[in-house]
Amino acid sequence: MDEVEAGKQKFLEVVQEVDRSVQVVIPVTPSNSMFLISLTKGPNRKFITVSEDDILDLPHEASIQAKVTKTVKDAIATL
């Protein structure tokens, strides 16, 4: 598994820890070094952007995990 795939897997784990009912769509490749990620819960959808560097560092850096977890929690709260 390459670094990007490991980061995407960790992102999915973060979302599942926050709310198991949220569906996630992560693009295969970033656009302008950003991933536009779709979070869907029931009829509601929210898009968030996460930098490619954050995805790469997510499995290894506690500070990045905290930042991404906060972003995910805030986004899910609006769903």
Image: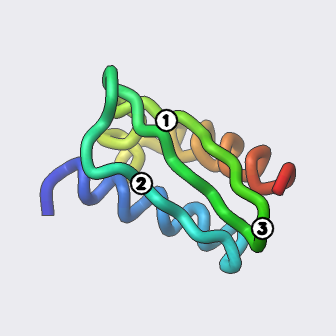
Q: In the current view of this chain or complex, which residue is farthest to the right?
A: 78
In the structure shown, which secondary structural element does the residue marked by tag 1 occupy? strand
In the structure shown, which secondary structural element does the residue marked by tag 3 occupy? loop
Q: Earlier in the sequence, mark 1 or mark 2?
A: 2
Q: In the current view of this chain or complex, which residue is farthest to the left?
A: 2
What's under tag 2, amino acid-wise? Ile
- The Cα atoms of the two marked residues, 3 and 1, are separated by 23 Å
Q: Quadrant of the N terminus?
A: bottom left
Residue in the foreground of this view, choosing between 60 and 41 = 41
Residue 55 in the image, given as x and y percentages of width and height: 38, 42
Pair 3/2: label in front: 3
Residue 54 in the image, given as x and y percentages of width and height: 41, 35
Q: How many marks?
A: 3
Judging by the rendered image, the residue that carries numbered circle 1 is 50
Query: Of the numbered discs in the image, which one, if any, rests on residue 43?
Result: 3
In the structure shown, which secondary structural element does the residue marked by tag 2 occupy? loop
Judging by the rendered image, the residue that carries numbered circle 2 is 26
Residue 44 in the image, given as x and y percentages of width and height: 77, 60
